[in-house]
Amino acid sequence: MNRDAKTVRLRDKVSFVIGVSNACVTPALAVRVPLWLPLFYTIQVIILIALRYIIYRSKRWHYFVFDVCYYVNILVMLFLWSAPENPLLFVIVFCLTNGPVAWAIITWRNSLVFHSLDKVTSVCIHMFPPLITYVIRWMPTILCSDGDADCLTAFETQRDTRFPALAQLPHISFAQAMIYSNAAYIVWQTLYFLFIMVGRREKVESGLRLTSYSWLLNDTNGKKGFIQKAAFMFGEKYKLYMFMLLQLAYNILTTIPTCFLYSHFWVHTIFLISMFAASVWNGANYYIEVFSRRYNLEVEKMDKKNLKAD
């Protein structure tokens, strides 16, 4: 076995360990010591994004790390460690994580494939942020399953001491959800447009760099699906502007339910379980439909070699 093959296999083994460990450790932390979960998330997401950047840079894919999901992860860490007393920031973080970021698990078909560092990272950066806001929002309810008033008060005090913003947010109004989160989204979109779509346009269009929008829109005939067809509705000249408009519409639509999630524990719980289940289902499809076929082909090749050797 050559060195590159050994490296790939080692990476896949490490990814498998990380993925399985996450599936075991994360819920345990969430229900037993939820205040530890933000640190666990922060350490993990920094390492995974750093590794992704290094790997993607070698493939000239590193402009992907300027996508909105990474921006939202930065906002989450900003709230956790720099501004836990800021209610406006928490509204933004809650709505973006439980809106466009969580729904991206379905729209981008994130797959929980334990041996793939890339797929584990994708699930992590989309699933962990909404889980963090869920735990912060519902920590007293999670820890006081019997609904004891004294227990709820004690853990609300503990949570509000660590995250004072929550004491000022008994609920999130529809107006707050739509205005604050979409304003934050527009800030990202403006920066992305200036830095990537305009500032790095030649590199992207020449194929020297790959981005999420160039990957989606690389079919100039717009035949791949709804996004491509809609983006090319007014011709190739306006495809980037149409793509940005579609992204904004997606952000608005997925943000609408977030104020409802903030007020209803079980709805929020079922929502996150559904998003995680979607990633598991996608992972199952990958293992059964893709990985198993590759594995069978490799086994067949080995059998043929053995027959020839005999």
Image (tube, rainbow, N blue to C red):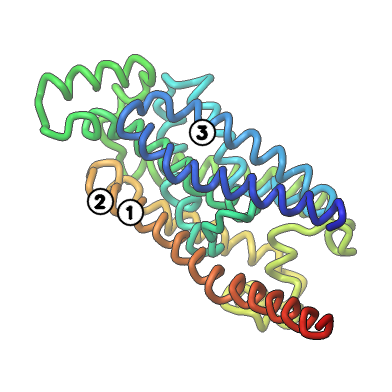
Vertical side of 16 occupied by 105: above or below: below
CB under 8 Å between discs 3 and 1 = no
Q: Nearer the viewer, residue 15 or 127?
A: 15
**Which residue is rendered at x = 53% and y = 60% of the image?**
111
Q: Residue at x 53, y 47 (%)?
A: 19
Q: What kind of residue is marked 1?
A: Phe
Element carrying mark 2:
helix
- Spatial separation of the CA atoms under disc 1 and disc 2: 6 Å
Q: Are marks 1 and 2 in contact (CB under 8 Å)?
A: yes
Q: Is residue 133 above or below residue 113?
A: above
Mark 3, secondary structure of its residue: helix
Instruction: Please rate how many residues cluster around mark 3, counting C-alpha atoms within 10 Å: few if below 14, some from 14 to 19, many from 20.
Output: some
Q: Position of residue 230 (x, y in %)?
A: 60, 75
Real-space Cα distance between discs 3 and 1? 20 Å
Q: Marks 2 and 3, Cα distance to the nearest angstrom?
A: 23 Å
Q: How many marks?
A: 3
Q: Do the CB atoms of the residues marked 2 and 3 lie less than 8 Å apart?
A: no
* Residue tagged 3: 41
Residue at the disc numbered 2? 267
What type is the residue that disc 2 sits on?
A: Val
Q: Which residue has dot 1 on it?
A: 271
Q: Is tag 2's residue or tag 3's residue first in the polypeptide sequence?
A: 3
Of badges 3 and 1, the one in the foreground is: 3
Give amino acid for label 3: Tyr
